[in-house]
Amino acid sequence: QVQLVESGGGLVQAGGSLRLSCAASGRTFSDYYIAWFRQAPGKEREFVARIDWSGGGRTYADSAKGRFTISRDDAENTVYLQMNSLRPEDTAVYYCAARRNYPFGDSWTRYDYWGQGTQVTVSS
């Protein structure tokens, strides 16, 4: 059974940094994408970044480019999201998600497995 467990959220001032972790278990992920999404109150869940577990290819939302970096640690079966230059508008619950690496888009509806989420709050 696939399990995704996020950690690393918290309260940070604008301009600060946080690193989120997603510990994945329950199967091998060599043919999977692992992604980060976020959802702010009253807003739809939105794509942030995705990594291809086997090839390492990365895709970012425009809002994340240049500030966020997604990476993976094969030995730890963990995916990270390094977030720098944080802004108040980055405040949201951040979720880790997984799906097979089919050539679909990155709508949250395409992802099969989800973590419980971790709160990120950026104060101005």
Image (cartoon, rainbow, N blue to C red):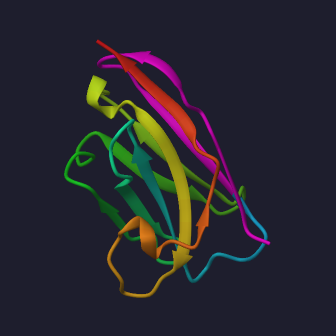
Residue 50 in the magenta stretch? The answer is no
Residue 87 visible (yes or no)? no
Residue found farthest to the left = 62
The rendered magenta stretch, by its main secondary structure, is classed as strand
Answer above or below: position of 1 versus 81: below
Q: Residue at x 41, y 26 (%)?
A: 17
Q: Quadrant of residue 32?
A: bottom right
Point out residue 55 in the picture as x, y percentages from the top left corner. Answer: 47, 77
Residue shown at 31%/17% (left/top)?
A: 14
- In the image, residue 9 lies in the stretch drawn in magenta: yes
Residue 5, relative to residue 111: is it above or below?
above
Percent across and percent down for residue 25 are 76, 64
Q: Residue at x 47, y 61 (%)?
A: 35
Q: Is residue 91 left or right of residue 29?
A: left
Q: Nearer the viewer, residue 75 or 22?
A: 22
Instruction: Say if residue 44 shows up in the picture.
Output: yes
Task: Give the residue at x 71% y 77%.
Answer: 28
- Of 103 and 109, which appears nearest the observer? 109
In which quadrant of the rendered image does the C terminus lie?
Answer: top left
Residue 71 vs residue 106, the one in the foreground? 106
Which stretch appears magenta? 1-23
Relative placement, left or right, of 29 versus 17 is right
Q: Quadrant of the N terminus?
A: bottom right
Q: Position of residue 87 (x, y in %)?
A: 27, 26
Q: Is residue 111 above or below residue 70?
A: below
